[in-house]
Image (spheres, rainbow, N blue to C red):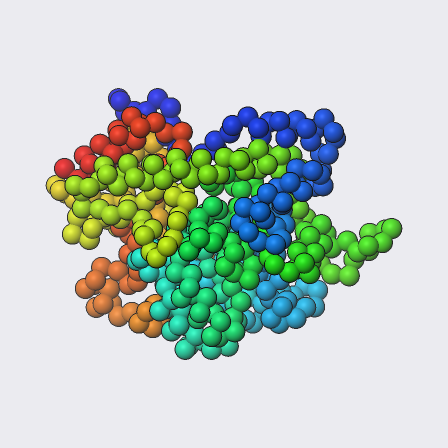
Amino acid sequence: MRDGAFVKKIWLSSPTMHGEEQKWVDEAIRTNWVSTVGENINEVERLVSEKVGRKYAVALSSGTSALHLAIKLAGERLYGQPKVGHGTLEGKRVFCSDVTFDATVNPVAYEGGEAVYIDTEYETWNMDPVALERAFDLYPEVRLIVVAHLYGTPGKIDELRAIARAHHALIVEDAAESFGASYKGIQTGCFGDYGVLSFNGNKIITGSSGGILLCDEQEDANKARKWSTQSREDAAWYQHEELGYNYRMSNIIAGVVRGQMPYLEEHIAQKRAIYKRYQEGFRDLPVTMNPYEYENAEPNFWLSCMLIHPDAMCRQVRGEQKAIYISEAGKSCPTEILEKLADYNAEGRPIWKPMHMQPIYRVNAFITRSGNGRARSNAYIRETGFCDIGADIFARGLCLPSDNKMTEEEQDRIIRLICECFE
Ligand SMILES: *Cc1c(COP(=O)(O)O)cnc(C)c1O
């Protein structure tokens, strides 16, 4: 660690506890509801359903398990119940967000489906409706779309929903990063046929882990509850008619979430202030921030990110594990900035690497505005420096330290460090 480094590490986004969490955890232990049933779970489901404005909220062990059950519910509704040992999406293509955390899309593979990645747009950094429409030209049989709201900024919801409706497709909405964000006054998590939230340790509020499945049909909520508790039938003994999972939220974890719920809006206000200070601090730099001013979207500002102007990028090359760059006066790149932040004990992160660039998904189709994103000519790539919008944002962007316990002085120093990278 270098001289002048932050004594206390500045995190990207770490848990912020308030005290009430302890009360509900203690209450669970005192009353011996140390299990996957109990009052904290019931309260979390009630509070979340009320906050989001959705009829049913099912508390699960993680956002990933909630996504799995959401995608399985959609798969069953579309294609019927598969034989045991087979997924609901076997042999089916599913349109998926490309720039997202892999938890959004892995459950498509759990269910035997094949993700087709849809390129990103610059206005919200989410799924591009133009590319989605093109994907339906190429694969008109597709009936399921899995879409995420990156870094807490709602995507182009009206456009995406209109396309889904026109093609009779269902939407699974991954609002893991956008809890509390809204679009035209309605909370994210309400726009998909199924919605998902996460209480992972780095999210806007946390339970250490945990997730929520949101839906409007009692039958779906009941099914998810049953699947999540090993698909036990209503019998005196363990009776099973279908495949089950151990996905229910723990009542201890639910105690933490319950204690965090009253602080969601406070966290959003703190994250908004952090975003605005970065925006102001970078006003003389050749950079922009992650976008949010699309229509009447109110993001939750979970992570502040920056995007370097193409002319201000020094040379940077990324392999599968490592990155190198060549320092240049007046220019910088995400690798240089991230190294500098790490030197000073502050945590930034590259933009989530697009799914179509991940080795695990290298054979999956990838659709851009102009067609098949994998069929770009080398000349095009040489000329533009990138082959698609997701790859471009990944190359030029980075996530900034966005912890709500960061002081203004600490943030000012981070801003100064970044400004120095462009000197
Ligand atoms: C965190 C996250 C998830 C997964 O949630 P877990 O609770 O960690 O399983 C899913 N999708 C996105 C976009 C996320 O950021």
Instruction: Give percent across and percent down for residue 92.
Output: 54, 71
Residue 371 quadrant: bottom left
Q: Quick check: can you spot residue 46?
A: yes
From this viewpoint, which residue is outermost toward the right?
Answer: 236
The quarter of the image holding the C terminus is top left
Q: Nearer the viewer, residue 246 or 50?
A: 50
Q: Residue at x 68, y 68 (%)?
A: 81
Residue 359 quadrant: bottom left
Horizontal relation, residue 133 to residue 58: left or right: left
From this viewpoint, which residue is outermost toward the left?
Answer: 329
The quarter of the image holding the N terminus is top left
Q: Residue at x 67, y 42 (%)?
A: 42
Q: Residue at x 22, y 59 (%)?
A: 385
Instruction: Decide: is 376 above or below 304.
Output: below
Instruction: Give percent across and percent down for residue 138.
Output: 42, 77
Q: Nearer the viewer, residue 143 or 4?
A: 143
Q: Nearer the viewer, residue 361 or 236?
A: 236
Instruction: Give percent across and percent down for residue 13.
Output: 42, 36
Horizontal relation, residue 333 to residue 170: left or right: left
Report the number of discs.
Answer: 0
Q: Nearer the viewer, residue 113 or 412?
A: 412
